[in-house]
Each structure stands twice: as structure tokens, then as C-alpha cells.
Amino acid sequence: MADKPNTSKKKTKRRSVAEGHAHVHASYNNTIITITEPNGDVIAQASAGSAGFRGARKATPYAAQIAAEKAVEKAKVHGLERVHVYVKGVGSGREQSMRGISASQIEILSISDLTQMPHNGCRKKKTRRT
């Protein structure tokens, strides 16, 4: 009788992370929240689209709050208690997503805005005439 190859999945070890980083990317159409370990490994991720919102409702502040709460609930399994928040983008879910994080009994240690700003690099496209 031939030996069967080991087809069982490798068990991932359970991480215990007390402090992490919450990256909020708020675009005009969606809000994506990613919670990572301090070294950058992703613990949990949620977006307004994955929270059940579709179309124009994805861009609302309420959808961003629900997405933030979902991401925090996934991360709490790993023992998350404190986060540093990094906000990027110009969408309407910027502030409301931070309220969603703090509403889930997670302590916010710092808030940083990483929104990219042009320093007058490339020339803009010429305006469209109709």
C-alpha cells in the first residue's frame, strides 16, 4: 500500500497582537480599512463593499463606520487593544471610520494623515473644451 501524501493544510499559528496599525484608505467611491501588526503583516481587512454596501452607498460615512467596526471585530480575535491610525485619501469616510474604531472599545494612540499632495511635479492635462 502506497503512502498517501499529506494533503491536510498547515495550521497557522494564532497571533497575539496587543498594539497594531489601522490603515484607512478613503476614496470617493469606497473606504478600505486594513489592520496590521507593527511590522506590517495584515491581521484583518474590511471595506464598505465587503460590509454589504453597493453602488453610491459605499461612499457614505455610515458605510465607512460599519466597515471599520467589522475590521476591528476581526482583529479583536488576535487580542488587539490599541492602534495607531493612518488615514489616506479624500473620501467622506475619513473621520467616521475613526469613530467606528473607537466605538469598538479600541484605544486610538495616534492619528496620522498620509494623503499624498502634489508638489507641482507633472504638468496637468489641458482643460476640455466642449
Image: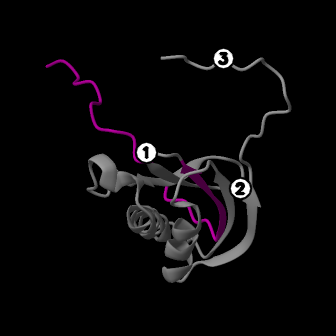
Residue at image position (47%, 17%) is 130
Residue 35: x percent and y percent? Answer: 56, 57
Q: Quadrant of residue 71?
A: bottom left
Secondary structure under badge 2? loop
**Is residue 113 shown in magenta?**
no
Residue 120: x percent and y percent? Answer: 84, 28
Q: How many numbered markers are drawn? A: 3
Query: What amino acid is labelled 1 in the image?
Result: Asn
- Name the N-terminal-most of marks 1 and 3: 1
Q: Which residue is mark 1?
A: 29
| Figure coloring | one colour
Query: What amino acid is labelled 3 in the image?
Result: Lys
Q: CA distance from mark 3 to mark 2?
A: 39 Å
Q: Which residue is mark 2?
A: 38
- Name the N-terminal-most of marks 3 and 2: 2
Q: Viewed as shown, does residue 47 lie left or right of 122?
A: left
Tell me if I can see residue 89 in this picture. yes
Q: Viewed as shown, does residue 84 lie left or right of 27?
A: right
Residue at image position (18%, 18%) is 2
Magenta region, residue range: 1-26
Residue 43: x percent and y percent? Answer: 52, 54
Residue 116: x percent and y percent? Answer: 74, 40
Instruction: Give above or below for 107 relative to 7.
Output: below
Residue at image position (44%, 62%) is 64
Q: How many C-alpha atoms fall within 10 Å of the one at disc 1: few (<14), some, or many (≥20)? A: some
